[in-house]
Amino acid sequence: MGPALPFSIDQVVVGRSARMRAVFDYVRVVADSDSSILITGETGTGKELIANLLHQASHRRSRPFVPVSCAIFAETLIESELFGHERGAFTGAIKDRPGRFEMAEGGTLFLDDVDDVPMSVQVKLLRVLQNRVIERVGGLRQIPIDVRTITGTKRDLRQLVGEGKFREDLYYRLNVIPITLPPLRERREDIPLLAEHFLKRFYQRRDQPARPLSSGVLQAFMRYPWPGNVRELENACERIAQTCTCDTVKIGCVPVSVLFHHTAEMTEPVIETHSHPSSVSLEERLRDVEQGLITWALKVAGGNKSKAAELLQIKRSTLGDRIKKLGLPDAGGEDAAGRIAGAD
């Protein structure tokens, strides 16, 4: 175990799963090192947050932390943005301008989306990391730098090396200390804690008490794969805080994209269509759609009619009437599957 951090991790990062606790423990070990760190993780997993945590836990904490995404710059601009430029270096360069490396002097530079750095700039980045000096675009003088470099990538750099899209020597220079962040779907036990944290924050901004999540909403959150990871969950909670007027957050308050999504556990109903039908019966098509939606809701709710009705935003009695009208197999009321799922 490394030295104690000058703050509590729980004050900075929310997560109590075994995967995240392992990341936090590793941060304690490597935080005060000046070696390059490569953080790998899908978009929205919190790479910049971990990079900032590493900086705040290091001896460089009193110096700047400069985060920059390499994906936002055009190939013609990224060199100037990273290394700076001299006056007259190109059209529009009306004065000397320091780059991100100089801005981070004595501190930490976080280069996110390093997988988007073009090959033409990769060799210059490697030279800077090896020699610890930079040359501004259009300049001749070498400027020494004292910067710790942390990089982030959403893609497997080793695979990009094999495809000839990333320099192997730069990969090894960046990957001295690797940290891999798990996607949210692989640490689902953190979802309730994160949702509570985000809702509390967004409701506080409105000077309102946070609304608790109903068990149905919590189950929907736990089933959803969160392809945008923590950032997507944060956005969903912000939308709920802005639009929900209920005392308890219900299914109807949840973004539709979270409820209707193709997953192994929660499958959106699929209605068959024909490219060139000879005739179409509106009543039959509406019946097919209604039957598909009810079947989907019952499957998602584990047979629990109360939860299925909440998903469909109708009364439980109305759901029962429609099941009988369509001649669907009765789920048997609050059956064993429903009891396992839990009733609101």
Image (tube, helix red, strand yellow):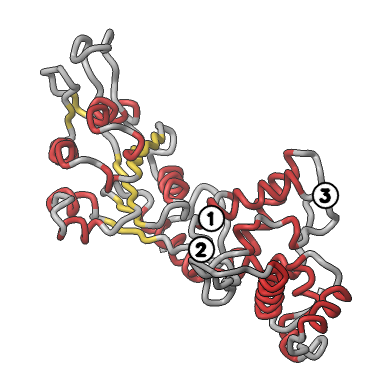
Residues at marks 3 and 2 touching, judged by CB atoms closer than 8 Å = no
Image location (x, y in percent) of residue 337 = 71, 88
Residue drawn at (18%, 36%) of the image = 121
Q: CA distance from mark 3 to mark 2?
A: 28 Å
Label 3 environment density (alpha carbons within 10 Å; few <14, some 14–19, many ≥20): few
Label 2 environment density (alpha carbons within 10 Å; few <14, some 14–19, many ≥20): many
Q: Is residue 236 above or below residue 313?
A: above
Query: In which image quadrant can residue 189 be found?
Result: bottom right
Residues at marks 2 and 1 touching, judged by CB atoms closer than 8 Å = yes
Q: Is residue 239 above or below residue 303?
A: above
Residue type highlighted by circle 3: Thr
Image location (x, y in percent) of residue 100 = 31, 29
Q: Name the front one of labels 1 and 3.
A: 3
Residue drawn at (78%, 89%) of the image = 330
Image location (x, y in percent) of residue 31 = 38, 51
Residue linked to disc 3:
245
Image location (x, y in percent) of residue 158 = 21, 60
Residue linked to disc 2:
184
Residue linked to disc 1:
230
For label 2, the SS is helix
Q: Earlier in the sequence, mark 3 or mark 2?
A: 2
Residue drawn at (80%, 91%) of the image = 332
Residue drawn at (75%, 74%) of the image = 308
Give the side of residue 321 with respect to residue 176, left or right. Answer: right
Q: CA distance from mark 1 to mark 3?
A: 24 Å
Residue 155 or 272: which is nearer the viewer? 272
Q: CA distance from mark 2 to mark 1?
A: 6 Å
Q: Earlier in the sequence, mark 1 or mark 3?
A: 1
